């Protein structure tokens, strides 16, 4: 028997996000309560290694500084206490899968693990021209520094899912609730880049499903793609959501809110898709 989606926004951001919005957390939480959510996970981007990408402007926008992490933790815990009894606020992080540098993540994470309730592991970076490149920065950067580097979209897609598989293996070694973030983020610019092979994507996702079921790593049913003009859909295909639910993979809706008005956005579409599994 398949599981049902809890009304839980499990992927959200805060004013600590350098590419987000200065809205205070209470604005996100109040909006979640108004929409009937019972649980809300705050999952900010933690620090990255110095010069992880070779672009100073972009680097400054990607994640909080290491010095800000304690303040972020305190900020969320303060709101967790303030909203007790009204909304289950959970402290989390959206970790990047850092191929070749997972020790960096393990080292900074270790002191905070006892307090963290939710961990999302996402693939935002692939090797490309000049080093690591951000797959969801902008279409022109993708074409110049990834597509030209790999030669074909098929090769980029394969490398992306290779990294997703490694990210799942990394997540499997973490404690508590852990999920793979926006598993089809590679499709963010699908309307303006050369077409991706749907059969290839389906084959790779089908291969990934048993990994999720075996490891207990959950799935972030990320609705942010609905707000992106170059994408226009949830970052988890409906068929994959249904198969994951049937397989007992923990599935958690995520608005990926970067401003308070995004909190809960996309829930209706995701919950309707999930209803097909009942």
Image: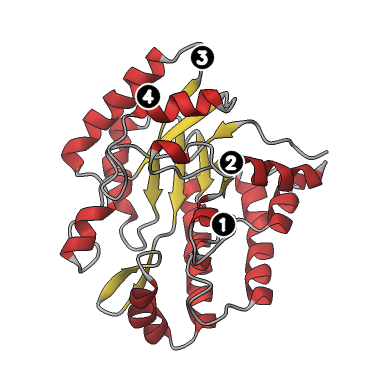
The dot on residue 86 is: 3
Residue 115 in view, yes or no: no
Question: Marks 4 and 2, how far apart in space?
Answer: 20 Å
Give x and y (percent) for residue 200.
64, 75
Q: Would you identify the image quadrant in which residue 23 lies?
A: top left
Q: CA distance from mark 2 to mark 1?
A: 11 Å
Circle 3: element type: loop
Side of 89 relative to 62 (left or right) = right
Q: Is disc 4 surrounded by few (<14), some (14 to 19) or many (20+) residues within 10 Å? A: some
**Which label number is shown at residue 253?**
2
Name the residue tied to disc 4: 26
For label 2, the SS is strand
Mark 1 vs mark 4: in front: 4
Please tell me the numbered disc located at residue 110.
Answer: none
Q: Which mark is residue 235?
A: 1
> Callout 3: 10 Å neighbours few (<14), some, many (20+)?
some
Q: Is residue 232 left or right of residue 133?
A: right
For the residues bearing labels 1 and 4, Cβ distance under 8 angstroms: no
Q: Please identify the quadrant where the C terminus is shown.
A: top right
In the depicted structure, whether residue 41 falls above or below residue 125: above
Residue sitting at x 39%, y 73%: 139
> Where's residue 258, x and y in %?
38, 44
Q: Is residue 271 visible?
A: yes
Please state the total of marks drawn on the protein image.
Answer: 4
């Amino acid at each position: 028997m398949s599981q049902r989606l809890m009304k839980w926004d499990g992927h959200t951001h805060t004013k600590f996000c350098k590419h987000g919005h200065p809205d205070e957390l209470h604005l996100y939480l109040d909006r979640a309560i108004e929409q009937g959510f019972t649980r809300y996970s705050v999952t900010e981007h933690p620090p990255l290694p110095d010069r992880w990408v070779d672009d100073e402007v972009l680097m400054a926008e990607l994640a909080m500084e290491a010095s800000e992490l304690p303040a972020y933790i305190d900020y969320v815990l303060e709101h967790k206490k303030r909203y007790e009894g009204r909304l289950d606020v959970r402290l989390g992080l959206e970790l990047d899968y850092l191929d070749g540098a997972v020790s960096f993540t393990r080292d900074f994470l270790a002191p905070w693990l006892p307090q963290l309730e939710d961990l999302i592991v996402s693939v935002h970076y692939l090797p490309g021209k000049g080093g690591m490149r951000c797959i969801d920065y902008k279409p022109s950067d993708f074409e110049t520094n990834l597509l030209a580097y790999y030669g074909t979209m098929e090769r980029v897609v394969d490398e992306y899912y290779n990294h997703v598989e490694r990210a799942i293996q990394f997540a499997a070694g973490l404690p508590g609730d852990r999920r793979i973030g926006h598993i089809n983020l590679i499709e963010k610019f699908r309307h303006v880049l050369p077409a991706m092979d749907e059969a290839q994507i389906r084959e790779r996702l089908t291969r990934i499903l048993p990994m999720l079921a075996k490891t207990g790593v959950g799935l972030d049913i990320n609705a942010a793609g609905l707000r992106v003009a170059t994408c226009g859909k949830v970052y988890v295909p409906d068929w994959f959501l249904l198969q994951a639910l049937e397989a007992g993979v923990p599935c958690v809706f995520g608005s990926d809110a970067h401003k308070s008005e995004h909190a809960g956005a996309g829930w209706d579409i995701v919950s309707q898709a999930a209803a097909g599994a009942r």
